Image (tube, rainbow, N blue to C red):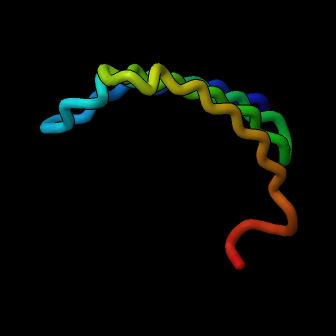
Amino acid sequence: MPALALRLGTRINYESQGYTWGAGFTRGPLTLGYAFEQATNDLGDWHRFALELALGRAGY
């Protein structure tokens, strides 16, 4: 069964980082994820992508 997850967050007491948000989509053993992190310094914002493949059976 396909699943969609949405995420929101922030870091407290970190001057160089702001809010974060992301999403993930799972279908069978495959998960595709994306995350965005706002930076308040000169390094700029971060975009992260993830591709996960579950191998084997869960619970071991």
Residue 50 appears at what percent x and percent y? 71, 39
Residue 43 appears at what percent x and percent y? 44, 27
| Residue drawn 25% across the image and 34% down it | 11
Give the vertical position of 45 relative to 53 (above or below). above
- Report the front residue among 42 and 16: 42
Give the vertical position of 30 relative to 2 (above or below). below
Residue 23 appears at what percent x and percent y? 59, 24
| Residue drawn 81% across the image and 68% down it | 57
| Residue drawn 52% across the image and 26% down it | 46
Name the side, left or right, on which 43 lies relative to 16: right
Which residue is at the far bottom?
Answer: 60
In which quadrant will I find the C terminus? bottom right
Name the side, left or right, on which 13 lies relative to 21: left
Give the vertical position of 27 relative to 22 (above or below). below
- Report the front residue among 15 and 30: 15
Name the side, left or right, on which 3 lies relative to 54: left
| Residue drawn 77% across the image and 47% down it | 52
In which quadrant will I find the N terminus? top right
Residue 47 appears at what percent x and percent y? 59, 25
- Report the front residue among 54 and 41: 41
Q: Can residue 5 be seen in this view?
A: no
Tally the marks. Answer: 0
Which residue is at the far front?
Answer: 42
Q: Is residue 14 visible?
A: yes
